[in-house]
Amino acid sequence: MQTQMYGTITPSWQLHIPVSARKIFKQHGRVKIELKEQSVQISPDKDDFMSLAGVFKVKNPIPADKIRDYIDYSDL
């Protein structure tokens, strides 16, 4: 899909991505930036750790505030 959109680069070099482009990405996270001559290509980083979110199903998740109750300190 070839679509042309316009964004803005701020004085601190942050890039504003238009809403229409954000709908294509569907989620935030790391991106891969490729420079080719005078153009920039931005694509989702598939090797990002965060891309694994929701992939693994946990049968009995441990609540974060109870995690210390499940740690065995006897070997320390």
Image (cartoon, rainbow, N blue to C red):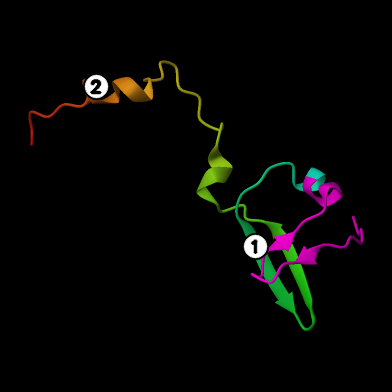
- Label 1 close to label 2 by CB (< 8 Å): no
Spot occupied by residue 67 in the image (x, y as percentages of width and height): 29, 24
Spot occupied by residue 32 in the image (x, y as percentages of width and height): 64, 62
In terms of secondary structure, where does tag 2 sit?
Answer: helix
On screen, residue 66 above or below 24: above
As drawn, the label of residue 7 is none
Q: Residue at position x 72%, y 67% from top?
A: 10
The residue stretch that appears in magenta: 1-22
Question: Quadrant location of residue 1?
Answer: bottom right
The amino acid type, in three-letter code, at marker 1 is: Lys
> Label 1 belongs to which residue?
32
- Tell whether 5 sits left or right of 48: right
Kindly report the secondary structure that dominates the magenta region of the rendered protein.
loop
Spot occupied by residue 70 in the image (x, y as percentages of width and height): 24, 22
Question: Quadrant location of residue 50?
Answer: top right
Specify which label sits upstream in the sequence, 1 or 2. 1
